Image: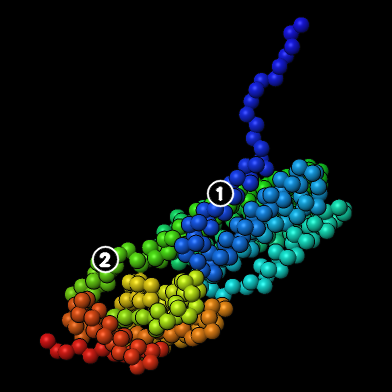
Amino acid sequence: MNIATAPVGITVNTSATLVALVTLSAALVFGLALMPRPSRATITWSVGFGIAMLATYVWVAANQFDSAPLRALSSGLIVCFEPLLWLGIRFYAGRRAFWPAAVAYIVIGPALLTYASTTDAYPVVFRIVFSAGAVFAGMSAWELFRLRVSARDVVLPLALVSSAFVVVAVFGVAAGIAGVGAAPGDQLRMLRDINGVGIMLTSQCAAITIVLLARGEALLRGGGRGGQDDLAALAGRLARARQHQDSAWSLLDIRLDDPADVQEAVGPAAFASIVQAFHEHVVDALPAVADVERTADSRALALLPGSDDEVRRHLRALLARVSTIEDSGPRAPLRVSASIGWVGARDADYDLEALASAAAEASALAQTRGGDRWERAVVPVR
């Protein structure tokens, strides 16, 4: 008698793969983004990865015990990654974060799915929760596309994956409303599987993007290249202005007031968040044509065009924006401020070294006079 034996093959356990990839992504974010660069953005992203990692463990338990409530809970927790991803991007960009919407979804979504898991209303509830998660994914994609970084390819994979989430949700809702294709139960199972595959893809893209944004922030934002390279753009701009005898250029030395005292008062994590917000406000408050270079955590140089009145208007706006840093989050019970040294390009014959020295002296003078102000440098006639 010949006994037919099945060929020995390699089987792939989707649940184990999901757990491994999401856990690896979470470890990368915790170790390479959160620990060395603690901020509101990296903390929010890390919480999202923690919830996603928990969701994969619940997913495995649901399959092991064939539990509908656990399966529904895991689906809800997995989608909760999307609002936290969006929230972290808003924090990173220095924009107002509408955290109540994200928190409400994180609390209501999984609870609603778990409660409805044993009822006939579950397919409808699942589509509603899935679609709401897709809304956050779409907002994440929008925020990534408008993020002000020099290396656009860093955010492109995550933005495209988030956009794909929206497309899948739209087709899922359309199929459910039209009642076409597979049976409702099969459609729901397919959406659940897509949800699992989607979180694997999203977690990988998000981990890479988050680590690069957190670790390479100065380079991506156009500063922090080190040495004389930091000032190459400023020197080139001054050379062109000198060639055309264009006097409507000014160099600003912008410094965070009392950085050592602030760091001691709030701690390293909160101080990193303040520094990030400081440089974001410097970039946002100045015109787009200005050249801004981050020369240190608490200092930046900016070369901008305009008349004296226009420069004064930008200075007032910049000081006002820096003074609101404490209002954008519970960082510390203290007021953050900056001091600015201002010198006209023609005052030092377009010499960058002389301009930087004069602006630095003016900035130091502004700090000795109490800070939260600007001082115009007086350059001796040579």
Q: Quadrant of residue 239?
A: bottom left
Q: Quadrant of the C terminus?
A: bottom left
Residue type at numbered disc 1: Leu
Image: 143 above or below 79: below
Q: Which callout, 1 or 2, points at the residue further toward the start of the chain?
A: 1
Residue 216 falls left or right of residue 228:
right
Q: Position of residue 163 (x, y in %)?
A: 59, 56
- Circle 2 residues within 10 Å: few <14, some 14–19, many ≥20: few
- Circle 1 residues within 10 Å: few <14, some 14–19, many ≥20: some
Image: 29 above or below 372: above
Residue at 70% over, 20% down: 6
For label 2, the residue is 227
Q: Quadrant of residue 122?
A: bottom right
- As drawn, which residue projects farthest toward the front? 264
Image: 244 above or below 156: below
Please give the count of numbered marks on the rendered protein.
2
The answer to whether any part of residue 97 appears in the image is yes
- As drawn, which residue projects farthest toward the top? 1
Residue at 39% over, 65% down: 218
Q: Regarding mark 2 in the picture, which secondary structure is present there?
A: helix
Give me the disc on residue 47: none
The answer to whether any part of residue 246 appears in the image is no
Q: Regarding mark 1 in the picture, which secondary structure is present there?
A: helix
Residue at 32% over, 80% down: 253
Q: Nearer the viewer, residue 262 or 335?
A: 262
Residue at 46% over, 84% down: 336
Residue 233 falls left or right of residue 207:
left
Image: 121 above or below 94: above
Q: CA–CA distance between discs 1 and 2?
A: 36 Å
Q: Position of residue 100 (x, y in %)?
A: 67, 73
Give me the disc on residue 24: 1
